[in-house]
Amino acid sequence: MGDRPLELSSAVASIRLGTASEHPEIVVIHNGSKAVDLEGVRSVELPLNQGIPGGRDTAMKLTNSDVVFFLDDDARVVGNWPSRVLDDFRNNDRIAAVSTRIVDERGCTSRRHVMRGQYSAVA
């Protein structure tokens, strides 16, 4: 944990590529690990690992963004889907949340990452 600075740099670069027409605010939570300095990134070092929910909760408290994406340091954004999602949020006030498909380097999805139900807060 916290020992993947090259992967983190690659994850951040993929966000920037996926939001090329935007200027994303990027907040990295170093959850119980030493912060890595990345240009244009707000890094926050938590002394103790708060777990995924705790780290994401901390990030939410530090941003004023209307739309928030979460990405782990061992993941990458593929294509420009973040920009498309941002456009969808701007153009459709019925959208509240979006979940993405997680695939490995072969394009396969683990069963634990497949959505099993579809829920809608808007009828």
Image (cartoon, grey):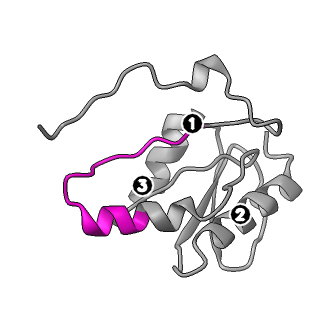
* Residue 62, image x, y percentages: 44, 63
Q: Give the range drawn in magenta.
A: 86-101
Residue 3 visible in the displayed image: yes
Q: Nearer the viewer, residue 44 or 88?
A: 88
Q: Is residue 99 magenta?
A: yes
**Point 52% across, 62% down: residue:** 82
**Number of the label disc, if any, that sits on residue 88:** none
To which residue does mark 3 refer? 60
Task: Please indicate whether residue 72 sits to the left or right of residue 95 in the image.
Answer: right
Front position among marks 3 and 2: 2
Q: Does label 1 or label 3 sit earlier along the sequence? A: 1
> Label 3's element?
helix
* Residue 120, image x, y percentages: 23, 34
* Residue 42, image x, y percentages: 61, 70
> Label 2's element?
helix
**Point 27% across, 68% down: residue:** 91
Task: Please indicate whether residue 48 sits to the left or right of residue 85 in the image.
Answer: right
**Number of the label disc, if any, that sits on residue 52:** 1
Q: Does label 3 or label 2 sit earlier along the sequence? A: 2
**Point 44% across, 19% down: residue:** 116
**Which amino acid type corresponds to the residue marked 1 in the rendered image?**
Ile
